[in-house]
Image (spheres, rainbow, N blue to C red):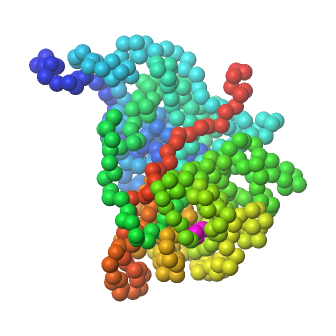
């Protein structure tokens, strides 16, 4: 085939690639890591962005709690992990590429700049690749208080070090964050080799996949019109939004390090707020505030909505403090912070099944107003906190109904455009029934959540001239009168930025 290839007949740069795979894993599914996870138990597996996990299909089907045993492609470590932190991908993604041989002259020099060949091969074969980051457990035990990075809950978004390289510099690998003192035994279960011993071709492959990925759709250099029709003018819109970046998913265990013995808040990172409303420090553990980045994310969305000519007449919000902060920052971006008060609606809170230890104790309207938040004190919630406590063991269908009924009641009791700020599930649970769709399964909802990043925005638009279907029970009474529409502004995308420890320069 190579001998008969006529390279002059095509503009493509043909190449021959040599891959290998482990034959013992032929029956396994390959999943890519969507969110990082730091082990909390000795039998858990650490998840890293860019890694792949081998899973047994039978184990996935048999799991009752979503935790399955898997093996890391990057380190060879085995352990248990939350399956919904991963997504199945092509088996070939986990193959190891050993060699790339160009079969014709390069049409564009840059297209060959990151091949595992020639000068690049010499660079990646050099020894002693320095690790990036420091041991989190050691940092936590240091004399100066440090924050232990722990990520791994239902609403988590990626927040771990990525493998990056500049030009042809050797890629730096993220060091294992938790390691026992004796023998290199990892919390991911069993013993494993350190990242320094990982084949460099694997590290190089991760760098290539990261730098070659494409986030913005369309062809390079070409203007791409929106494929979804814009919202019709003159129709009502309901804007559904997830909150911004939260402190606990960014810094992990933070309360013990950020409050002194008297209960006074002291920030330990520039991404933490300068001040917090006065309350018992322990209450913040279950009602996390936003980071400064999270507040800025929300303000950018508000500014984008304002630039798109969006007008908001009513704002409803989950009682979680992170959602109230998000709504406030969106209104700031819209220029409505001082004039449009926020209606706190407990019925917009997320699935109660995730709170087996009890519902969080939220800040009261008086406490929020004392902290300079513009709250509608005249608003009467459709679902009270007492109502939530009575339905503490709600099922998934009941959760969908609760959120959907709140959204429907808001639509019926208001006029004009409405903003609803909630959680990762809010975008689906508040729109699913109203737009005429059926309830999702737990797995489907989990996969939807994985793709709802911080400050994601969805829009429901009324359908002109549509009538109700008259269906009752769990079906929405306004089913068929609303549809999902393209958001008025672009999404917000950014990468991760791990905590820096200057002591690494002293090694």
Q: Is residue 17 above or below residue 192?
A: above
Report the front residue among 145 and 357: 145
Q: Which quadrant would residue 467 be assigned to in this image?
A: bottom left
Quarter containing the C terminus: top right
Query: Would residue 417 be visible to someone looking at this image?
Result: yes
- Point out residue 293 in the picture as x, y percentages from the top left corner: 62, 47
- Point out residue 82 in the picture as x, y percentages from the top left corner: 50, 52
Quarter containing the N terminus: top left
- Point out residue 85 in the picture as x, y percentages from the top left corner: 48, 50
Q: Residue at x 45, y 29 (%)?
A: 207
**What is the tally of numbered marks visible in this picture?**
0
In this picture, which residue range is highlighted in magenta?
Answer: 315-319
Q: Is residue 178 above or below residue 463?
A: above
Q: Residue at x 43, y 58 (%)?
A: 487
311 part of magenta stretch: no
- Point out residue 489 in the picture as x, y percentages from the top left corner: 46, 53
Report the front residue among 378 and 214: 378
Query: Would residue 349 be visible to someone looking at this image?
Result: no
Q: Residue at x 40, y 71 (%)?
A: 235
Report the front residue among 506 and 362: 362
As drawn, which residue projects farthest toward the left? 4
Q: Residue at x 72, y 71 (%)?
A: 365
As drawn, which residue projects farthest toward the right? 262
**Magenta residues, dominant SS class:** strand
């Amino acid at each position: 085939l190579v001998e008969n290839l006529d390279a002059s007949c095509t503009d493509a740069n043909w190449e021959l690639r040599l891959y290998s795979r482990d034959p013992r894993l032929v029956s396994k599914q390959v999943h890519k890591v969507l969110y990082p996870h730091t082990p909390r138990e000795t039998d858990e597996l650490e998840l890293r962005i860019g890694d792949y996990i081998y899973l047994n299909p039978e184990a996935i089907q048999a799991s009752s709690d979503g935790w399955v045993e898997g093996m890391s492609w990057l380190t060879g470590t085995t352990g248990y992990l939350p399956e919904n932190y991963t997504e199945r991908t092509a088996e070939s993604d986990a193959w190891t590429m050993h060699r790339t041989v160009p079969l014709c002259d390069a049409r564009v020099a840059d297209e060959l700049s990151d091949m595992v060949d020639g000068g690049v091969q010499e660079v990646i074969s050099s020894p002693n690749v320095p690790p990036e980051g420091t041991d989190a457990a050691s940092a936590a035990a240091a004399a100066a208080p440090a924050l232990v990075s722990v990520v791994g809950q239902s609403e988590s978004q990626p927040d771990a070090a990525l493998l990056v390289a500049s030009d042809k510099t050797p890629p730096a690998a993220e060091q294992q964050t938790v390691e026992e003192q004796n023998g290199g035994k990892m919390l991911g279960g069993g013993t494993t080799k350190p990242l320094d011993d990982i084949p460099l071709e694997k590290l190089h492959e991760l760098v290539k996949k990261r730098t070659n990925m494409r986030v913005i759709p369309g062809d390079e250099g070409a203007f791409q019109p929106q494929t979804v029709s814009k919202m019709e003018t003159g129709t009502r819109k309901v804007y559904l939004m997830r909150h911004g970046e939260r402190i606990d998913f960014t810094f992990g265990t933070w309360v013990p390090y950020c409050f002194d013995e008297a209960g006074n808040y002291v920030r330990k990172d520039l991404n933490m707020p300068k001040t917090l409303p006065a309350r018992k420090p322990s209450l913040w553990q279950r009602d996390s505030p936003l980071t400064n980045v999270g507040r800025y994310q929300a303000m950018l969305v508000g500014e984008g909505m304002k630039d798109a000519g969006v007008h908001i007449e009513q704002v409803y919000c989950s009682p979680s403090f992170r959602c109230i902060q998000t709504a406030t920052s969106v209104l700031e971006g819209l220029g409505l912070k001082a004039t449009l008060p926020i209606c706190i609606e407990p019925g917009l809170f997320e699935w109660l099944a995730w709170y087996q230890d009890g519902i969080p104790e939220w800040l009261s309207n008086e406490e929020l107003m004392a902290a300079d938040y513009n709250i509608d004190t005249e608003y009467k919630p459709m679902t009270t906190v007492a109502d939530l406590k009575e339905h503490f063991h709600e099922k998934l269908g009941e959760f969908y109904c609760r959120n959907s009924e709140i959204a429907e009641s808001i639509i019926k009791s208001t006029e004009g455009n409405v903003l609803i700020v909630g959680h990762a599930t809010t975008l689906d649970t508040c729109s699913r029934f109203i737009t005429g769709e059926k309830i999702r399964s737990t797995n489907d909802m989990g996969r939807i959540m994985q793709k709802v990043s911080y400050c994601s925005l969805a829009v429901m638009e009324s359908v002109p001239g549509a009538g109700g279907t008259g269906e009752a029970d769990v079906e929405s009474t306004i089913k068929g009168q609303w549809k999902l529409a393209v958001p008025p502004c672009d999404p917000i995308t950014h990468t991760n930025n791990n905590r820096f420890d200057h002591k690494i320069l002293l090694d």
